[in-house]
Image (tube, rainbow, N blue to C red):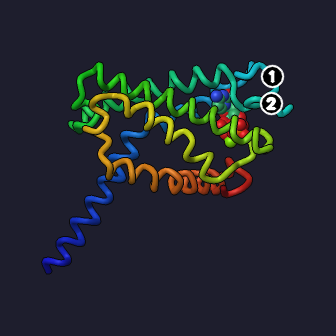
Amino acid sequence: MVYEEIQTLDFQSIISTVAIAIWLLLPAYTPNNFAVVFGGGKPIDLGRKFIDGKRILGNGKTIRGLFAGISGGIVTAHSQLFLENILQINLYSSLEYSSFIHIAVSLTIGAMFGDIIGSFIKRRAGFERGTSVPLLDQMDFLVFALLLASFSGVFSVLFTPHVIIAGFITTPLLHILTNFIAYKLGLKNVPW
Ligand code: CTP
Ligand code: MG
């Protein structure tokens, strides 16, 4: 009986930690979606090649996509603040506005920067633009988002070790799940 209670409690705390991790990481998750929708035009590397003769970043990283992504992430974070106030959830809304904006902007810029670093690594490894590289594609943005956000003094108030671990485990699984749903809906040709 007691054992069962502990099990239930554990399961619930895992679920709530995962939910908190996803919620807190939304300003890092959404920028790439905004870049996909609103990106295009001039590539960030302006078409230039690296010393290895391959493109520095490639045509998949555009200036418009970068700005759309950053704006999108910041809009997302503010929408979350708004929703938290309505639903009386105290995560981002528990912070001073200046701390909130510091973390939100860091997560967003860090995510876009990590995505760019990921493309840089992919080009050096000889992968063409658009090739999916498992783990790198799902982790580059997360690592840099958290790294940049960790410079905020109140980072650890929300991003506890448990939340960070949950984020690292959930992110690739979420990616697989969303791709599978997109495939089932006919938005993608392959389920990965
Ligand atoms: N995108 C953009 N600018 C960015 C990031 C993304 O315009 N800074 C758009 C591009 O149209 C890109 C799409 O979003 O093709 C998907 O992003 P992503 O998967 O990161 O790029 P890939 O095309 O797969 O290129 P890479 O191989 O370099 O990751
Ligand atoms: Mg890609």
Q: Name the residue under label 1.
A: 47
In depth, the one of 120 and 176 nearer the eye is 120
**Circle 1: residue type:** Gly
| Numbered circles on residues, count | 2
- Left or right: where does residue 136 sit relative to residue 171? right
In depth, the one of 180 and 20 nearer the eye is 20
Among all residues in the image, which is located at the extreme bottom? Answer: 1
Sooner in the amino-acid sequence: mark 1 or mark 2: 1
For the residue with label 1, is its CB less than 8 Å from the closest atom of ligand 1? no
Q: Quadrant of ligand 1?
A: top right
Residue found at x 31% / y 34%: 155
Picture quarter with the N terminus? bottom left
Where is residue 81? Give x, y as percent. 31, 29
Where is residue 88? Give x, y as percent. 21, 36
Q: Mark 2 points at which residue?
A: 55
In depth, the one of 20 and 121 nearer the eye is 121
Q: How crowded is mark 1: few (under 14 residues within 10 Å), some or many (20 or more)?
A: few
Hey, which quadrant is residue 129 in on the image? top right
In three-dimensional space, the C-alpha distance between marks 1 and 2, rounded to whole angstroms, equals 7 Å
